[in-house]
Amino acid sequence: MAADSGARDSVEFAATAARARQATTHPHPATDKTPLVLSGATVVLPTGTVKNGQVVIDGTRITATAPENAQVIDVTDHWLVPGFVDLHNHGGGGASFTSGTPDEILKGIRTHLTHGTTTLVASTVTGDMDFLAQRAGLLSELAEQGDIAGIHFEGPFISPCRKGAHSQELLRDPDPAEVRKLIDAARGQARMLTLATELPGGIESVRLLAEHGVIAAIGHTDATYEQTVEAIDAGATVATHLFNAMPPLGHRTPGPITALLEDERITVELIDDGTHLHPAALQLAFHHAGAQRVALITDAMDAAGFGDGRYMLGPLEVEVSEGVARLVEGGSIAGSTLTLDRAFKRAVTVDRLPVEDVVAAISANPARLLGMSDRIGSLEPGKDADLVLLDRHFDLKGVMRRGEWVVGPQLG
């Protein structure tokens, strides 16, 4: 009976999602497929930055040469960078990826898309196992249809000592059988699972994830340095929002931060919103890990792109004030209201990072982790025409996804 109900829910979700997508994601589908040349911009390529460069779009792809009938748009005094790739995102536009309806989920995707995120992994929060499995099945519909790049499970296999904005009553040890249940429920669309690898079953679960091609991310952890090294050797490859929800770095007890920064197999997530990290901590991570091992993420919740107020994050109530999200009970930081265009601008203008390093961290590196670098993450011929247009102050002026303008171009 439960299985029949789940299948019916999945079919209904897919049908509703299709209707919602038509209404919200592409309200005015492009009909003009004339090849396009964006000319005169400073273009950030994997090989370096090109001034007075150009990007040619033909259909949904970037091409090497412009056909004679191509339309030319002068974008002088602007930057052209690849579309942003967000590995860790719980929602936006007032919508939760953990609990929202299809319409709400697509609204959340659309919100981040208008801020430059052309590829997004939908993250869930700690919940009952049956509920998470059901949501995985539903979200997999959107992944199969190309609206999201997959699913990230954050919890419930995390440490009660470092639970952050997760319900303690729903936490559990990472039993490999239960980890496998979530992988199976996602129908090949599970991309990452965050767990405290020091808990019973943690190392076995890391090995299971690696065997199934799912990123094992160390986070919400109370692990020692030695325990973290063991997890990396078992196959963990990502640090979930480094520094946050883990023991601080100590000179006698270096903890997980040191192990995660020093190992070349690890990519570290960073939330550059001015709240989660002191600028010096962000600089420390970039210096020791190097730009090629950083992924800038949002860890966004419903309020991203929506505004202050009261929200629910899983079963927990959140108060968002002046753009900072905290649990009503206890005051723990509860995700962020960040969008990646703001993270990009802050990284360049406040943190003074080289634009090329920021592009690597916000596009190329997460694309590589997702196994999608043959299609996204850089402005190269043959790849999807996913790009962001920024003015000289690094404010967003245009977003293109697969050859269609989502925003702009705003050149006035």
Image: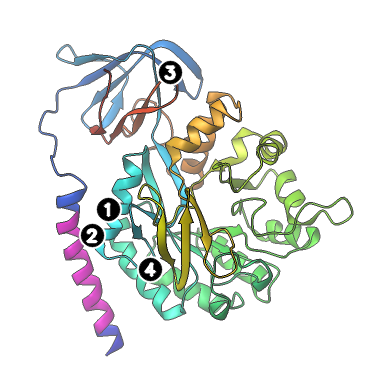
Give amino acid for label 1.
Answer: Lys
Residue 146 vertical position relative to residue 319 in the rendered view, above or below: above
Colouring mode (rainbow / by chain / secondary structure / one colour): rainbow
Q: Quadrant of residue 201?
A: bottom right
Image position, residue 188 (x, y; %): 39, 62
Nearest to N terminus: mark 3 or mark 2: 2
* Secondary structure category for the residue under label 3: loop
Sequence-first disc among 3 and 1: 1
The circle on residue 107 is 1
Q: Position of residue 29 (x, y in %)?
A: 13, 39
**Looking at the rendering, which quadrant does residue 112 occupy?**
top left
Q: Could you tell me how far apart the alpha carbons at marks 3 and 1 are, in whole angstroms?
A: 29 Å
Q: Residues within 10 Å of mark 2 (few under 14, many from 20)?
A: some
Q: Which residues are magenta?
A: 5-20
Q: Is residue 15 magenta?
A: yes
Q: CA distance from mark 1 to mark 2?
A: 6 Å
Residue 81's tag is none
The reply, left or right, for residue 325 in relation to residue 242 is left
How crowded pointer 3 is (Cα within 10 Å; few <14, some 14-19, many 20+) is rated as few
Comes first in the chain, label 4 or label 2: 2
Disc 3 target residue: 392
- Farthest residue toward the bottom? 1
101 w.r.t. 290: above or below? below
Q: Residue at x 53, y 24 (%)?
A: 355
Which numbered tag is attached to residue 103?
A: 2
Indicate the secondary structure of the residue bearing disc 1: helix
Q: Are circles 4 and 1 on residues that touch, CB within 8 Å? A: no
Give the labeled residue for mark 4.
136
Q: Are marks 1 and 2 in contact (CB under 8 Å)?
A: yes
Using the numbered discs, state the Cα–Cα distance from disc 4 to disc 2 in whole angstroms: 17 Å
